């Protein structure tokens, strides 16, 4: 999503490729698990990161905002496999909304204690509106 980050030319300034962002978000949306609210919020985050890169030009290193996976809030892609093995906990549910938490496996090397998911009902389906890390108090 930031092509210059993979360029060997250190004079290329980092900019967000919105075509790549929109393709990524369309893929997420087509999974059938995330709502339009989720993809709109993610798009707004990419816009903020693009604004940061425009205000503070960057030429090397991990692009600001793009140094972790925004779905699992980690740099370690193996954590997704670990999270998928965990039993989700329903924290609350109303007729149209719910909150589910995936506790962090006890052996994981991360400061968070899990991931929370804000869900909304769309017909007979529950879709993800928000994902955020949960930290111990």
Image: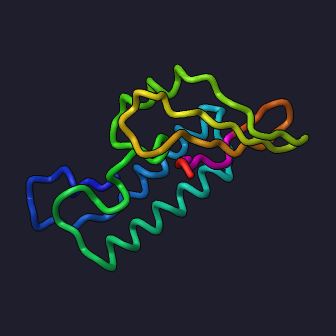
Residue 114 visible in this rendered orientation of the protein: yes
Which residue extends farthest top?
85
Q: Residue at x 90, y 40 (%)?
A: 95
The image shows residue 65, relative to residue 96, as above or below, that is: below
Q: Position of residue 27 (x, y in %)?
A: 52, 38
Q: Farthest bottom residue? A: 55
Residue 23 visible in the snapshot: no
**Percent of width and height locating residue 63:** 28, 59
Q: Nearer the viewer, residue 23 or 73?
A: 73
What's drawn in magenta, residue-wise? 128-134
Q: Is residue 98 left or right of residue 70?
A: right
Residue depicted at x 59% and y 33% = 102
Could you say where residue 117 lies in the image, as x and y percent from the top left?
65, 42
**Which residue occupies the extreme front position in the image?**
137
- Looking at the magenta stretch, what is its main secondary structure? strand
Q: Quadrant of residue 41?
A: bottom right
Q: Position of residue 23 (x, y in %)?
A: 47, 45
Q: In the picture shown, does residue 121 fall above or below 105?
A: below
Query: Is residue 110 within the magenta segment?
Result: no
Image quarter for residue 49? Answer: bottom left
Which residue is found at the position 53% from the left and 58% from the top? 43
Residue occupying the point 45% across, 30% down = 80
């Amino acid at each position: 999503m930031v092509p210059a980050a993979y360029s060997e030319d250190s004079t290329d300034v980092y900019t967000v490729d919105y075509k790549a962002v929109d393709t990524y978000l369309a893929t997420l949306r087509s999974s059938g698990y995330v709502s339009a609210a989720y993809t709109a919020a993610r798009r707004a985050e990419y816009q903020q990161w693009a604004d940061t890169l425009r205000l503070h030009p960057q030429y090397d290193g991990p692009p600001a905002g793009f140094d972790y996976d925004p779905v699992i809030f980690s740099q370690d892609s193996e954590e997704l496999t670990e999270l998928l093995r965990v039993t989700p906990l329903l924290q609350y549910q109303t007729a149209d909304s719910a909150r589910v938490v995936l506790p962090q496996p006890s052996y994981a090397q991360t400061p968070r204690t899990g991931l929370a998911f804000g869900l909304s009902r769309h017909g007979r389906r529950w879709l993800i509106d928000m994902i955020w890390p949960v930290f111990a108090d």
